[in-house]
Image: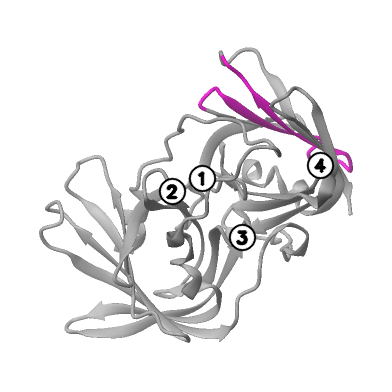
Amino acid sequence: MLALLFLACAPDPTPEDVSPVLPDAQATPVQPQESEFDFWWGRWSVENLGPSGALWVNIGDAEAHIQPILSGRATLEQWVGTVNGNSLNGFSVRSFNADAQRWDLKLNWPNGSPAPFSSMVGTFEDGLGQFFAENVSGQSYSRFTFSEAQADSCQWDSSYTTDGGGHWTTTWIMEFSRLDDPEAADGATFPIADPPESSRCTDESARQLDGLVGAWSGTVRSLRADGVWAEGTTEVAVSSMIDGCGLLHFADDTWADDLLSQSFGAIAHAGAWYRIGATSLDPTLRTARGLLDGDTLTLTEDDALRERWSGVGTDTLTWTLETSADGETWEEIVVRELQPR
C-alpha cells in the first residue's frame, strides 16, 4: 500500500546530544502545545477509506487505543485492524519538542516484516495538524494530517508529494469514531499484552525479548548531581506490541517525599534492536540501538548513554543506565533491581 511504503521510507532516527536526567533535575517546563493531541486520547473505531476513481470506499476497519503517558506529556497510539484485506498493527508515540517548538513522532507499522522506527515532525495551526517525513531524494515526502477534531470524531489522512510539496496526492483516510474516554498508561496501571503465539515476526531473533513481558517491581537507585545515590522503589510494566515485533515498557519510580518520576520506552526488532524512550522530567524522545548477547541486552545512544537489561529470560532482572564522556569508560547513574510482581 502506497501510504505504508512512504512511511517505511522515513529516515532512521538520528541520535541527538544528551544529558542524564536525574531525580533532582528540573523538569522541562510544560508547554501549552503539549495539550494539542489531547483530543485524540481514548479508544476509537476506525473506518479506513481508499480512493476508487472519484469515490472513497471502505478498505478495512480497525480499533485504535490512544493513551496519555508520562503524566500526559506524551501520547501513545496502538492500532489494530485490516487494510485491503491484510491485517495491520501500528504503533506511534508523540512528544512536543520544546526546543524546536514542534511535535516529534516515532512510528512503527511493520508492513509484512519487522522494521525500525521511522520519524516525522510537524505542528498544529488553527486546529489542523500536519506532520512530514522526507526521503533521501529531498523531493518525495509523506504527510500525515489531522483535521475535523470533534468530541467524538476526527479524521486522519496520508498523502505524498514527488515535487517537493507542489502537489499532494491523498492515498488513505481514517475516520475515527469514539468508543470510550482515555485512560492513563503510566507504569503500574498499564495493561500488559502477552506475546502472540504466532505473528509476522517468526524469525527467532525477533522473539528474543519475550521473556521481559510482565509486571516487575523492586528498588531503584540514581546518582544525583552532588554524587549522592538516591534510593526508591519502582514498578515496571513490559508489554508485547505490534503483533509481537516489539515491546513497550514503563517504569514508575517513587523517591523520598513521594516524588514520582516516570519513564517510557519502546523496542522493535529489525535485524538489531531499536529503542526510543522519554521521561516525565524530560519528554524529549531519545533513540538507541543494540543487540542481545547471552542474557544481556545493550542499547547505546550516540556513545553517550548506554542502557542494559541483564537477566533477560530469568526471574532476576537488572536495568542499568550508564553515561560516558568518551564512549569507552562507562559510569552507572540509574540502577533498577527487579523481580516478577
Residue 246 vertical position relative to residue 32 in the rendered view, above or below: above
- Nearest the camera: 306 or 20? 20
Residue 21 in the magenta stretch? The answer is no
Residue hosting label 3: 69
The residue under label 1 is 285
Sequence-wise, which precedes: disc 3 or disc 2?
3
Residue at mark 4 to residue at mark 3: CA–CA distance: 27 Å
Residue that numbered label 4 is attached to: 313
How many residues crowd around disc 3 within 10 Å: few (fewer than 14), some, or many (20 or more)?
A: many
What residue is drawn where x is 50% and y is 70%?
38
x, y percentage for residue 234?
A: 82, 47
Element at badge 1?
Answer: loop
For the residue marked with disc 4, what is the amino acid? Gly
From the top left corner, tell me how far across and down residue 250 is, in percent: 70, 52
Q: CA distance from mark 3 to mark 1?
A: 13 Å
Residue beneath the point at 11% across and 53% down: 163
Q: Which mark is residue 266?
A: none
Q: Are marks 2 and 1 in contact (CB under 8 Å)?
A: yes
Q: From the image, tell me which residue sits under label 2.
A: 97
Relative to 295, 142 lies left or right: left
Lower sequence index among marks 2 and 1: 2
Q: Is residue 230 above or below residue 110?
A: above
The Cα–Cα distance between marks 2 and 1, rounded to whole angstroms, is 8 Å
Q: Which residues are magenta?
A: 302-325
Could you tell me how far apart the alpha carbons at marks 2 and 4 are, in whole angstroms? 35 Å
Mark 4, residues whose alpha carbon is within 10 Å: few (<14), some, or many (≥20)? Answer: some
Q: Amino acid at mark 2?
A: Asn
Residue 307: quarter of image: top right
The three-letter amino acid code for the residue at tag 1 is Leu
Q: Does the rendering let one see residue 322?
A: yes
Horizontal and vertical percent position of residue 42: 57, 76
- Vertical arrangement, residue 264 with respect to residue 313, above or below: below
